[in-house]
Structures are given as C-alpha cells and as structure tokens.
Image (tube, rainbow, N blue to C red):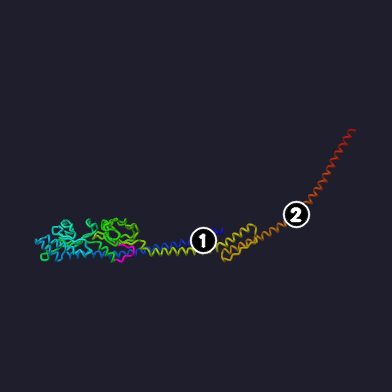
Amino acid sequence: MKLKLQAKLTVIFLGIFISTFALMGVIAYQGSKESLKECVLKQQHCRRKGVEGRLNSFCNERQRDIRSKATSIYIRGRLERIEEGQASDVLVREIIMRLKQMIEGDPSALELFIIDISGKVIASTDETQIGLDKSDRNYFSKGRDFITGITDIYYSPIFKQPTMLAFTPIIQLETGKLLGVGVERVNFKHLSDTITNECALLKEEKIFLLDKEGRFVCGSIASEVPFGKKFFSDSMKDYSSGNCKSISRYKDYKGQMVIGNCNWLADKQCMLVVEISEKEAFKSIYKIRNWFFAVGFIVTLLIAVLVTMVARHLSLPVIKLREAADKVAGGDLEIEVEVGTRDEIEALANSFNRMTKDLKSSRQKLEEWGRTLEQKITKKTGELQEKVEELEKFNKVAVDRELKMIALKDEIESLKKKLEGG
C-alpha cells in the first residue's frame, strides 16, 4: 500500500509537470524554429537578389567585353581588308592570333569567333569551328540586325558544359556596313569562382544555377558537382517549364534536407538556387533544444525528488491511519494516531482517535454489562435449581403416595373377591 500510494501520487505530479513542461517546450521550439526559418529565408532572398544582380552584371560585362574585342581597330581593319578582296587567308590567320591573345588572359571566355555576313565562321580560337555554318542561329540573326546581346544558357555538346554566347555586330565606321558578327562563348567556371569568392557563404550554404534541363551551370558547388551534371530534386521538377514556385524545405541532390530559396530566371532560362542544410540553418535552435532537454532532465529529477518527498509527506498520515485501522480491527483499542499536518488528514486522524475511544468505552460498558448479566443469570439459575429440587421431592412423594394408593386399591379388590366367594 505504501509504495502504491506514493507511486500514484508521484506519477500524477510528475505527469502534470512533464506534460506542461513538454507542451511549453514544444510550443516554444516550434515557434522559434518557424521564426528562425523565416529569418533564414529572408537572408537567402537577399543573397539571391544579390547573386541575380551579380549575374546580370556579369552578362552586361560579357556584352561590353565582346563589343570591345570584336570591334577593335585591329579586327575591324582586317575585316575591312577582307571585304575589299585582299588575301583573306593571311588576314584570317592574323585575326585568329589576335583572338587568341585576347582570350589568353580572360578567364570569362571559352572561345572567341567571328562570323561573316553569310553566317560562316571565318576565325575562331577553336580552329575546329572554322568553316561551320551559323546562319541559322538566332544570335547571328540578331547580330546581323545590329543588335548586341546575350543568349540563354544552354548546354554545349562541344565543350560538354553549360554556356551562353555574347554577340555583337562588327560595323564599318565610315559606311555603317555590316562586316560580320563577333561572338564570345562564356566560361561559367569563372562565374562559379566569382560567386564563391564574392558571397560570404555560411557553412554548408550553397548558391548555384541550373539550366532548363536541370544541368548544373555554375555556383559554389562547382568543386563537388561536374559542370553539366543533370539533377533534379523532387520539389524542383516543374521549374524547367518556368512553373516553379518559391519552395523552402526539400531534399537536395544528396538527399539531405535543406532550406532553400529558388527563383526561375525567365530571361536567362535558368534557375537560381540558394540553399543551406537544415541542420546548419537550425544549429542554434538545435543547441537550445539540447540544452532544453538537458535542463528539463535535471529539473525533472529534482521535481521527482521533491514530488516523492511531497507524496511521502501526504501518504504517511494515510498509511498511519490504515495501520491503526488494522490494529483496531485486530482488537487493539489502545492505539492513538498522531498526525501534525494541520489539515483535513489531521482532522480525520482526530476523528479516528475519538472513534477508537468511543469503541473502547462501548466495549468496557459491554463487558461490565456482560459481567452483571452473568451474575444475574447465576442467581436465577440457583433459584431455579432449588425449585427443581423441591419439585423433584414433591414428585417423589406424590409418586410414592400414588403407588401406595394403587396397592391399597388392589388389596381392597382382592378382599372384595374373597368376600364374594365365601
């Protein structure tokens, strides 16, 4: 009984405490986690906007760069001489050498080439491309229309990596006549390095671009993901069609849960992704959670000790009353329970003591009455015994008298018979 009562009280008190503590902890944890998640997403949004600006600047730089290179006096002069009918082989060789010099110190360019007005590549830093027909290319059509611009990101089967082309028309200054189109093939590896170096990335934070086929274009994961590697996360499956909405929590290409901010760049036909591992993003809240569990465990132990003491304090008077009741049931009416709790239990103990005293008094009266009754019964029994003896004596006398009367009667009858016979 002792252990059961204390255990019940302990379980009740601990259950109430742990339930309240756990509920408050869960509410605080979830609220803090959501707040931290919003902060992370806002930070990622700002970072993504910064990278978008850097990407736009990079594209503008590439357009200025190809305009500067392709329209240089050296390139334009030799194209004019080719247009005039001078020895084109020598002039083309000179243009190729010049293009190679231009690209040699430029990490942003993979290839420089010149297309004549018919759409044929006449000079290129990659000589395997010379002679190819580009007349059906959209960028050639735009360049021929005197437009300087940049193409969408696409995957180059030649270089086996994503790229884009910056193009510009090459115009004869005096006549405004089109001499050709200058094209620069962009090297996204350089952009990856730029993004990694310029962005103060947090631990396990990644920024990268994917093309419309889901291939890696550039970004901070260039060292671990080959350029052009194709991958999708389940949450990004619709982004190639431009239908991707902002997503915040998903599994990355490694299958790890991350917090991400994604945006489809329609003008470049690619997706910009800023993400950080959920473990790293919530590291501070996880630390708080661990501290909460540790403190909660210690507090629970202290509460358990305190509750056990309180349960013992509450249960001991009840146990004393039960033990006293068992002794009273066994006939011991001399016991008296002393409880100094100054509450209802003490009042119950006092009532129990009064009841015990009343029982003792009643038993004493009953015993006295029993003794008196026994004396009366003994006296009455003696009187009855005397009367019985008297009755027995009387009965004996009566019987003897009756026997004598019967004998006398028989004798009279015998005398009568004799008289009649005589």
Mark 2 burial class by Cα count in 10 Å: few <14, some 14-19, many 20+: few
Task: Determine which residue is flagged by label 1.
Answer: 10
In the picture, measured across the screen, residue 171 lies left or right of residue 400, that is: left
Most foreground residue, 50 or 14: 50
The magenta stretch is 199-207
The secondary structure type at the circle numbered 1 is helix
Q: Is residue 205 magenta?
A: yes
The secondary structure type at the circle numbered 2 is helix
Of the residues shown, which amino acid type is indicated by label 2? Thr
Figure quadrant of the C terminus: top right
Mark 1 burial class by Cα count in 10 Å: few <14, some 14-19, many 20+: many
Task: Determine which residue is flagged by label 2.
Answer: 378
In the picture, measured across the screen, residue 222 lies left or right of residue 4, that is: left
In the picture, measured across the screen, residue 137 lies left or right of residue 8, that is: left
Q: Residue furthest right?
A: 422
Determine which of the numbered discs, if any, sits on residue 31 in the image: none
Whole-percent x and y of residue 44? 31, 64
In the picture, measured across the screen, residue 49 lies left or right of residue 144, that is: right
Whole-percent x and y of residue 57? 23, 65
Q: Nearer the viewer, mark 1 or mark 2?
A: 1
- Earlier sequence position, callout 1 versus callout 2: 1
Of the residues shown, which amino acid type is indicated by label 1? Thr
Type of secondary structure dominating the magenta stretch: loop
Most foreground residue, 119 or 129: 129
Whole-percent x and y of residue 260? 32, 61
Most foreground residue, 273 or 165: 165
